[in-house]
Image (cartoon, grey):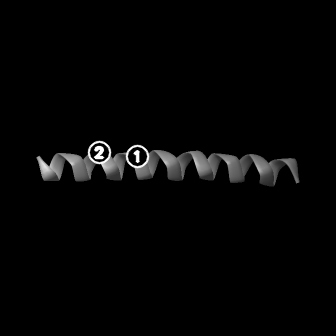
Amino acid sequence: MPINFEISALAQDFMWIFDFKCVENIKIDFH
């Protein structure tokens, strides 16, 4: 279970970074 929890946390961090980059790209597009 601990391993699955770590993978889940890593996936959440990755998605957060992915969302952040998408937001930055959208800001650049609007500029």
Which quadrant of the figure contains the N terminus?
Answer: bottom right
Task: State the residue in front, 7 or 25.
Answer: 25
> In the image, residue 9 lies at what x, y percent?
69, 47
Q: From the viewer's perspective, tell me whether residue 24 is left or right of residue 31.
A: right
- Give the farthest residue toward the left: 31
Q: Secondary structure at mark 1?
A: helix
Q: From the viewer's perspective, tell me whether residue 14 is left or right of residue 21.
A: right
Amino acid at pointer 2: Glu
The residue singled out by tag 2 in the image is: 24
> In the image, residue 13 lies at what x, y percent?
58, 45
Amino acid at pointer 1: Phe
Q: From the viewer's perspective, tell me whether residue 22 is left or right of residue 8.
A: left
| Alpha carbon distance from label 2 to label 1 | 6 Å
The residue at 35%/46% (across/down) is: 21
Q: From the viewer's perspective, tell me whether residue 21 is left or right of residue 2.
A: left
Check disc 2: other Cα within 10 Å, few if <14, some if 14-19, many if 20+.
Answer: few
- Residues tagged 2 and 1 counted as in contact (Cβ below 8 A): yes
Q: Secondary structure at mark 2?
A: helix
> In the image, residue 19 lies at what x, y percent?
43, 52
The residue singled out by tag 1 in the image is: 20
> In the image, residue 4 lies at what x, y percent?
79, 54
